Image (cartoon, coloured by chain):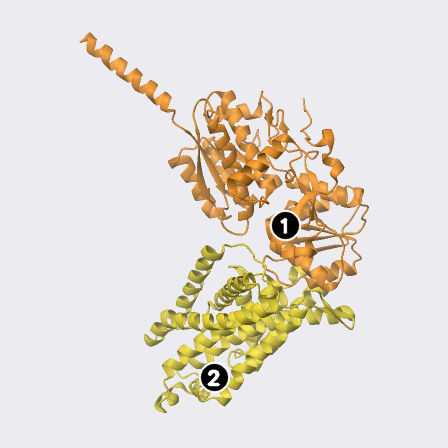
Amino acid sequence: MRLKWILTAAAVSFAMAGAAIAADPIKIGLSGPFTGGSSSMGVSMRDGVKLAVAEINKNGGVLGRPLVLVERDDEAKNEVSVQIAQELINKEEVIATLGFINTGVALASQRFYQEAEIPVINNVATGTAITQQFLPPKDKANYIFRTSANDTIQSAMIAEEAVKRQGFKKPAILADSTNYGQLGRQDLEKALATMGIKPVATEKFNIGDTDMTAQLLRAKEAGADVILTYAIGPELAQIANGMAKLGWKVPMIGSWTLSMASFIDTAGANGEGAMMPQTFIQLGDTPKRKAFIDAYQAAYKVDRIPSPVSAAQGYDSVYLLAAAITQAGSTDGKKVREALENLKTKVEGVVTIYDKPFSATDHEAITSNIPVFGVVKGGRVVAAHPEDIAGDKAVRVKPATN
Amino acid sequence: MNILLQLVVSGIAVGMIYGVIAFSYQLTFVTSKTLNFGQGEALMLGALVGLTTINFLIGQALGNWLAYLLMLPVVFVFGMAQGTVVEWLGVRRAVEAKSEAGWIMATIALGIIFRNLAENIWGRDALRFPSPLPEAALNIGPIRVQPMEIAIVLGALAMMLAVEVFNRRTIYGKAVVATANDKDAADLMGINTRRVITFSYALSSTTAALAGVLIAPVTLTGATMGAALGLKAFAVAIIGGLSSGMGVIVGGLILGITETLTGYYISTGYKDVPGLVLLLLVLSLKPSGLFGRAAIKKV
């Protein structure tokens, strides 16, 4: 009898040890638009994430367990993304989710992760409200983090660049009629107001509009000396092409979407010189960045990363999550969130070196000093002010807060 | 004054785009009293097939201009085939079953299927269509026009003229006109009206497909390009009158010019409103359209 117990106990412990050796993987959700109008951002983000996961797994995984991605295409649609969130949480039982390109999609679906107490790291979507949806004390704790430069930061940078750095006094704002465009326009107007500047024209257009003559003529007649934009690729290209048609050329400065391939490729020569804030430029100015770019080019057989910013932010979000899981010593959502809010190790990413990137009250890894201005030149985005990323300015880090 | 001229010129270019799509709606309506609500998708498919063809031809070391010309017959044939498919699958059964609304749902459904198909083949990104003409704008007096905008206006007019000539000068065209005037009488005269209706669908889709490759160098190409244009053109067809070829040109110009003028003189946020108000006015005051013949419908 006793022998039988001993044997059983031995068998059970062997079985458990066996499980530990086989190391059941850590499941991480990945949600983004991999088809459709924002797919260049979604696919780059996904590929950046996959690159980081492959590297981590090659080095033994996290807590001795490999990371496994559960990828889902949210098609940039709120309703699809909501279904995906529920599937990832309840069926796949992921321990965290990375992704979201579209602000509306993020706002609609991260609610489910918040309720399930599973951390989310937004690595591309920029809507200012994203990290502020579940702030304590209203909610017990906020599970939503971000590694992209939000719209408040971007609009302030755009205003700063146009007014202070380049001395334009009469900006015209051209924004599309979506949430993205109109919230961005509000942020831009606020940022300009702090400098005592009122836009001479504020124009609107719909997704799919083919003619920008009226908007551009209004801006021109109002005496605009620069055009500030909040829109996405195809319509931005129509603005650049429309200006060429009217034979009117003023600089275009706008949100980071001016780096979208659908703008650069469809505007062609007319898009040269457009400027936008970028957290990452495909330049390889530090060894870490060079290694990342080389690895990306080798893995996906491309020369130009479709959306370098998305790829870099996606890559970094994996390392931040991995560091938090390691520190927590567990995949429990609550413990991982606490670890993210109090990361004790420095994480060297390609965008920046993350030294205490988050706190209980601040879930934004990127501060306004980190992004630099990019400019479209020869069909690629390069640094607008090379001195910004020269020498010790190459890696800009979030200032320490106490 | 110069600004007004510039706005009107841009409005004419946009309006002709609406007009030519509206014209293609009108082609099927006169013969069968049915419409293809997937006309925007016929335009989009034409443009995307054209894009693939022209890129292939340019890849064969042909110039943009020659590649564009050689691409046109391919799009023509594709449009004929696509229209025939729509008529066979979506319209014929519903009309034979004397279903009042069946063809509406069927053509909408086919339109959605075509859009999904296009999304899977070409993706959902907006793509650049190589322009056969120089892209630099021309100075004509005080105004500036892209050569392609002029081509759109001329091309649209040429297409409509070609259809008119075909209808008046050829025996097949006369069969179409006879069916349009009185389907039952045409039937009795030995005209195969069923075939005429299939043909009018083919012609209608070809017109839309050719309109697609005509406007693509200006508007960008993509699976969703047809949706907004198809709807606007439908409004134009109602404003101008579904039974009048002349009406759709005028209707298109009215809508295009109102849009750009409202955008400039009132607000770009309200650009689409006056056109739709006009649509409501026409529907309540002259439901057959500005140039339409009032039809007596026997019930």
* x 62%, y 29%: residue: A362
Q: Amino acid at mark 1?
A: Gly
Residue B176 in picture, x, y percent from top left: 44, 85
Q: Give the color of chain B as drawn.
A: yellow
Relative placement, left or right, of A201 versus A37 is right
Secondary structure at badge 1 equals helix
Residue B48 in picture, x, y percent from top left: 51, 63
Q: Is residue B291 visible?
A: no
Residue that mark 2 sits on: B295
* Chain label for disc 1: A
Residue B275 in picture, x, y percent from top left: 61, 69
Image quadrant containing the N terminus of chain B: bottom right
Residue that mark 1 sits on: A181
Find the residue positioned furthest to the left.
A1
Find the residue positioned furthest to the bottom.
B189
Q: Residue B299 is drawn in which quadrant?
A: bottom left
Give the crowd class for mark 1: few <14, some 14-19, many >=20 residues within 10 Å. Answer: many
Query: In this view of the protein, which residue sits in the foreground, A21 or A333?
Result: A21
